[in-house]
Amino acid sequence: MVAALKEDHKYLTVAVANATESKQKFELNVTGVRLAETSTLWQLAGSSLVAENHLGQPLLVEEREIPMGDGPGTISVAPATVNTNRLTVAPAQRGSVSNPTCCRHKTIK
């Protein structure tokens, strides 16, 4: 798992790979910015952990773009996927912290 805040502070990107055969969940706790309720998920999903595409054959690994309206909090990660979540940062309120300090997360086993 990695996270990065865009230089203009408009988006927080969280990338997670789930190399297991079961759905994983983690709680995303961000300090220093307030996240909006909208996000986008780009997902690379395979039919199994060893899936691969071959020319002229049906795709076993597919790319998806999924609009998410549930906002931050618990993030679910489907089995055998690589996920990039782009979370929208809400405009700063007067007197709020403008430089986020960290992202805390639970390690996925």
Image (tube, rainbow, N blue to C red):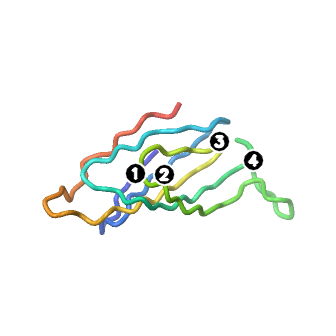
Residue depicted at x 35% and y 63%: 6
What's the residue type where badge 1 is placed? Ala
Q: Nearer the viewer, residue 60 or 24?
A: 24
Residue depicted at x 60% and y 56%: 43
Residue depicted at x 54% and y 44%: 76
Q: Nearer the viewer, mark 3 or mark 1?
A: 3
- Earlier in the chain: of badge 3 and badge 1, it is 1
Give the labeled residue for mark 1. Answer: 3
Give the labeled residue for mark 4. Answer: 47
Measured Cα–Cα span from mark 4 to mark 1:
26 Å
* Label 4 element class: loop
Give the labeled residue for mark 2. Answer: 15
Q: Nearer the viewer, mark 2 or mark 3?
A: 3
Residue 75 left/right relative to 36: right
What's the residue type where badge 3 is placed? Pro
Residue 59 left/right relative to 7: right
Compared with residue 20, is residue 36 higher up or lower down, i.e. above or below?
A: below
Compared with residue 56, is residue 73 higher up or lower down, i.e. above or below?
A: above
Measured Cα–Cα span from mark 2 to mark 3:
14 Å
Give percent across and percent down for residue 46. Answer: 71, 49
User: What label does residue 79 carry, if any?
Assistant: 3
- Earlier in the chain: of badge 2 and badge 1, it is 1
Counting other residues with Cα less than 10 Å from the Cα at mark 2, is it few (<14), some (14-19), or many (20 or more)?
some
Measured Cα–Cα span from mark 2 to mark 1:
6 Å
* Label 2 element class: strand
Measured Cα–Cα span from mark 4 to mark 3:
9 Å
- Earlier in the chain: of badge 4 and badge 3, it is 4
Counting other residues with Cα less than 10 Å from the Cα at mark 1, is it few (<14), some (14-19), or many (20 or more)?
some
- Earlier in the chain: of badge 2 and badge 4, it is 2
Check contact, mark 2 vs mark 1: CB within 8 A. yes
Compared with residue 10, is residue 51 higher up or lower down, i.e. above or below?
A: above
